Image: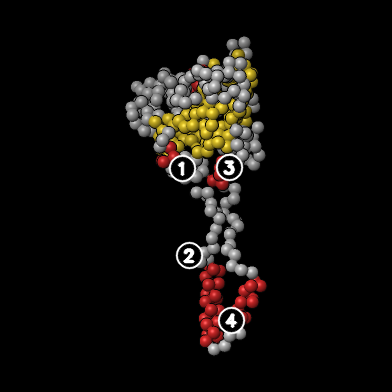
Amino acid sequence: MRPEKTIEQGSSASRATRIPAILMVGGRSRVLCVLLIAGLGIVAWAWHKNSSVFARPQEVAVPGASAEDETGPDLDFDRRCHSPGVVKCAGFDSPKEIAPSVYNDSRGQLRALIDTDVKSSGRGSLRFEIPSHSGQNSSGGWTSGLGAAFGQGQTFYVQYRQRFSPEFLKTKYQDAEGWKQSIFHMGTSTCAAMEITTVNSYHRGYPQMYTNCGGRSFDVDLHNYDFLYETGDYNCHRSNPNPHDCAFYKANQWMTFYYEIKIGGWGKPDSTIKAWVGYEGEPLKQFENGLNYQLDFNSSPSDGFNAITLTPYNTGKSPAQDHPTAYTWYDELIVSRQPIPAPGQNTRHE
């Protein structure tokens, strides 16, 4: 049970000395004393019953959180948002929160909204609709600042939760190269030298990553007509994709994606990009271990990563295809300068 605050109303010693002082006064004061004592008795009874008038003030809870739940998802997200080093925290709880950052699809329609029924915590989540007969920009996106700019020699961490409808995972979109999840970039340039993108490449069914507008992937060439598409706890071979070695997406649950980006010198193979994924209720497992990796700037060595885009953009997707309407949701985005716990964990992830 959450501890309740109480209002100090004087010590027992002070109350013991004031009442006898009144009783010592004769005549009319005795009548007032009796009325006072009776009134105090009524107040005490109402306080004990916790009536709406005399209810004891409680601690202010996180919006949407139960006052009796000290370990619920709302308070867990609030604690992570207030961890040292956090520079951005987005809970996607109201239309006002996303209004400045969402943009339309290729037809000028707004496909992003706050879903108050499907959420990981708080009052809502950011939902994108992928309608039938839609092109590569099927749903628009959400672009916002990272909370700071990160350049050479700096490190930043990103985590968010994402959910997928069964239709989204089952549909093989015609002529498409695979839908994206997130893009870390600079300014409004989402397809540039300075870019780190997570994508369901060619609808293989698990996350992969690339930079430089797709010009440089994180795939490992094994030089035997095989590639590792995921590395770390997962080692996903192109020749043998399976659920044990590949982090396949799962529908109807909140999956966690967690990133560590250590920037070396621009144009030098000394950066490190690591990424983890966690199924709902399970620990994170690494799916990307990019060591000695080269990251480039856009136009100047003073450039830095300062923006993030969340979008199901699917390069090449044919608007002629008739397919089921699909959805994907985002929630609990946090950007930080140092590692912080993942959802439901009490220790920092490093």
Q: Which residue is mark 2?
A: 52
Q: Which residue is mark 4?
A: 22
Residue labelled with disc 3: 82
Residue 258 is situated, as x and y percent measured from the top left of the image, at: 58, 32
Secondary structure under tag 3 reads loop
Q: Residue at x 48, y 19 (%)?
A: 192
As measured in the structure, the alpha-carbon distance from the residue carrying label 4 to the one carrying label 3 is: 51 Å
- Look at 59% across and 50% down and name the residue there: 70
Q: Who comes first in sequence, dot 4 or dot 3?
A: 4
Mark 4 and mark 1: Cα distance apart in space: 55 Å
| Number of other residues with Cα within 10 Å of mark 3, as a class: few under 14, some 14 to 19, many 20 or more | few
Dot 4 or dot 1: first in sequence order is 4
Which residue appears at 47% of the width and 29% of the height? 309
Residue 259 versus residue 25 in the image, above or below:
above
First along the sequence among labels 2 and 3 = 2
Crowding at label 2, few (<14), some or many (≥20) Cα neighbours within 10 Å?
Answer: few
Q: Could you classify mark 4 by the number of other residues whose Cα lies within 10 Å: few (under 14), some (14-19), or many (20 or more)?
A: few
Q: Position of residue 64 (x, y in %)?
A: 50, 49
* In this rendering, the label closer to the viewer, 4 or 1: 4
**Could you tell me the amino acid type at mark 3?**
His
Q: CA distance from mark 2 to mark 3?
A: 32 Å
